[in-house]
Amino acid sequence: MSDLRLNPFTLATFAPGDAASFAYDRGAQATGIVHFGIGAFHRAHQAWYTDRAMSAGDRNWAITGVSLRSGEVAHQMNPQEGLYTVTERAGEGASTRIIGAVRDVLVAPYEPEAVAAALAAPATRIVSFTITEKGYCRAADGSLDLTLAGDESVYHYLQKGLRRRHDAGLPGLTLMSCDNLAENGKQLARLMREHLKRCDPALLAWFEAACTCPSTMVDRIVPAPTADDRDAVAEMLDGLRDEAAVVTEPFSQWVIEDSFANGRPAWDKVGAQFVADVRPYETAKLRMLNGAHSLLAYVGLSHGHTFVHEAVRDPAIRLLAEQLMREEAAPTIIAAPGQDLAAYTDALIERFANPALQHRLIQIAMDGSQKVPQRWLETLAANQRKGREAFAILEGIAGWIKHLRGRNGPIDDPMAQDLQTVVQADDPVNALFGTNGLLASDWVPRDTDRTAILSRLA
Ligand code: NAI
Ligand code: CS2
């Protein structure tokens, strides 16, 4: 296997394989987007849309990525001058596209000045985020956790960049969250306001007048890339190495609230949807897809499965996933115009069963404290208000408690320590979800709920 890396020179020289590629002059594009959290999902979703929008004629939407925590992606992408590939896999088929939209990656802790300059650049119009649910520094009640929102937080960097724009008389920015949170834009706006009230109150009025925070629903299953993925892509590229390669499914969906401070790419020309209200789309996605995903993760792991496609092929687990989507989540959702939730469930089961993705359950199992509220507790509360039980979700909670008790190894969760303590209690359900529980919510467990969960903890 050659050591030649994918970069503009090797791409021009070797024009690898039959990979599709971008159709615009990369060097001529201004950087219009700064993206925080340039992980696998951004590369397979928003950057993929933006690349195709520029290939279709849109201009000046190059992306500067920012990593807040590690230099890994910068080391993967900067030697490639931002070039990387997206490979879609379904069954035996695979197709690869070379993406040119990303220009470079900054590692914020080592180059804060470069991050502030990128945010303050006149050509920058959008700041987007895939920083995981925990990146928003929320306390259990959803407010800004001041112990987390320090100088390393996304809010600190945003404040520095926005302050410069204000002082230079530049337009505001669109802050576009692409994370799996309910009303992600509204949450980001609220949390940023909380940060500014504390750290730069004089900027607050300008932020509210000049910046927007649209909500989005984002959907594409993107497993964490592996060394085998990178080797398979190198074979497709006639030996060129792409260390930032991502593998995903053919399906992709992006629904965006059309509220932009200073323009936006023509993403709708390449399959995205601009709408006035994202909520019907995001509620269905979070409660059905993500709700079922977390059930498959915790129940699948407790049954000895490793991948999503294995868990969904286990008849007992598939039955639970279908029950959660069809009978427990769907009845709580006001469908978007033209949205058929029964057909949506069928499509989700098919997507989960795609063996080509090798989507690890342990990846989905991480950060449960940040995911369970919007994936399960909202659904439980909505059913409780109607006097309905949701036993599939209760089965998922039992699986999560077993996970937190160490059944599947170390816990990857920002609240791991507290969670591991409370699940040792005689009544872990009350300690987690009761009125004064760690994850207290609108759902208050009844005795029937408690019995259903505790009976499954054996
Ligand atoms: P990843 O692990 O490849 O990237 C995560 C990114 O978030 C990295 O840049 C990391 O540095 C950053 N990050 C992690 N913790 C952070 C913190 N506390 N503060 C600031 N930044 C932090 O993960 P991936 O696959 O890119 O997913 C990221 C997010 O994208 C998910 O959490 C989810 O919200 C969203 N998403 C992911 C999908 C997928 O299938 N992977 C699909 C739909 C949405
Ligand atoms: C998954 C999501 O890791 C997880 O929690 O449920 O990342 C899922 O793959 C995406 O939301 C699909 O769009």
Image (tube, rainbow, N blue to C red):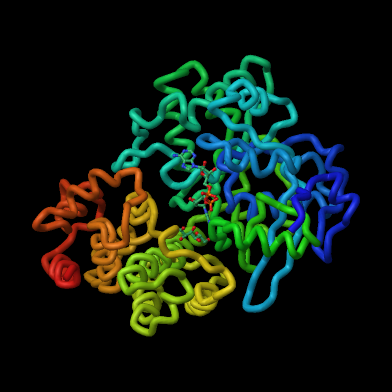
Instruction: Give the camera-side residue of 217 and 238.
Output: 238
Q: In the image, residue 314 lies at what x, y percent?
A: 39, 81
Query: Along the horizontal axis of the image, is 164 left or right of 408?
Result: right
Furthest residue to the bottom?
Answer: 315
Q: Position of residue 80 (x, y in %)?
A: 74, 43
Question: Toward which corner of the image does residue 232 lie, by quadrant?
Answer: bottom right
Q: Residue at x 53, y 24 (%)?
A: 159
* Quarter in which the N terminus is drawn: bottom right
Q: Tell which of 100 and 262 is nearer to you.
A: 100
Please give the name of the residue rendered at 63% of the width and 32% of the height, measured from the top-left corner. Answer: 106
Depth check: give the residue in front, 182 or 407: 407
Residue 45 seen: yes
Q: Image check: 173 left or right of 142?
A: right
Instruction: Decide: is 226 above or below 455.
Output: above
Residue 356 percent location from the top left of the image = 59, 72
How many marks the image carries: the answer is: 0
Instruction: Residue at 44%, 39% (x, y): give it.
Output: 136
Q: Position of residue 163 (x, y in %)?
A: 57, 19
Q: Eyeballing the image, is 117 above or below 426?
A: above
Q: Farthest left residue?
A: 426
Give the farthest residue toward the right: 13
Looking at the figure, which quarter contains the C terminus? bottom left
Quadrant for residue 56, please give it.
bottom right
Residue 62 in view here: no
Q: Is residue 104 left or right of residue 313?
A: right
